[in-house]
Amino acid sequence: MTDDERPNWDFKDRDIAILCELSRDPQLSSRELTDVLESEYGIDVSHVTVSESIRRMRDEGVFREAIIPNEEYYTFALFEFKFNTEHFDEGWRDAMESIRDDKHTLFFFLADGEYQWKTVMMFPDLEAISRWIHDCYKNHGDVIENIRNSSVHKVLKFQTDPQIYEDLGEEHGE
């Protein structure tokens, strides 16, 4: 993320505490969060202020909300894409948009190195993973030279640790 893409947000201790607590329990109401802020952080604000802070942070892109199903319902897979440079120019955008917009894609990103696209995807079973790879080669084989995939057999952690938000205060001089 470049500085131009980063939300322009002046983090207050209250904002960081809100992010930490919502990471622990995304279902907290603003009233419950107000109580936690006072008892755990010594921050005395109204539930209206808390609700407004959450709304403004969401609107400014400070955090994103996503519905992520229980990992027990799906097989997760990491895919890495190596390209055929001979046909890359004419087909890269279509391939990228197809992978990015695919219903199985949870997380899609660019990386350095030989395999420059990577995605974490969710499938109902291993057969669906094989079918997806087959279809991807069929539709975009002129652009994609190789797909390296790893099935994730047991998800051991699937959450954001609240402590990560404490770095925002340090990063912004608090």
Image (cartoon, rainbow, N blue to C red):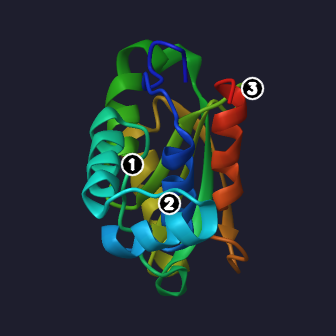
Mark pair 1, 3: CA separation:
28 Å
What is the number of the mark on residue 64? 1
The residue at the point 49 percent across, 74 percent down is 25
Instruction: Using a 10 Å C-alpha cutoff, classify the residue at mark 1 as few (fewer than 14 neighbours), some (14 to 19) or many (20 or more).
Output: few
Mark pair 2, 1: CA separation:
19 Å
The residue at the point 44 percent across, 20 percent down is 5
Labels 2 and 1: the sequence-earlier one: 1
Quarter location, residue 42: bottom right
Q: Which residue is mark 2?
A: 121
Q: Secondary structure at mark 3?
A: loop
The residue at the point 44 percent across, 27 percent down is 9
The residue at the point 69 percent across, 24 percent down is 173
Closest to the camera, between mark 1 and mark 3, is 1
Q: Secondary structure at mark 2?
A: strand
Q: Please state which amino acid type lies under the numbered disc 1.
A: Arg
Q: Are marks 2 and 1 in contact (CB under 8 Å)?
A: no
Q: Please state which amino acid type lies under the numbered disc 3.
A: Gly
Q: Which residue is mark 3?
A: 113
**Residue 81 drawn above or below residue 104:** above
Q: Are marks 3 and 2 in contact (CB under 8 Å)?
A: no
Mark pair 3, 2: CA separation:
20 Å
Instruction: Using a 10 Å C-alpha cutoff, classify the residue at mark 3 as few (fewer than 14 neighbours), some (14 to 19) or many (20 or more).
Output: few
Q: Please state which amino acid type lies under the numbered disc 2.
A: Met
Q: Are marks 1 and 3 in contact (CB under 8 Å)?
A: no
Labels 1 and 3: the sequence-earlier one: 1
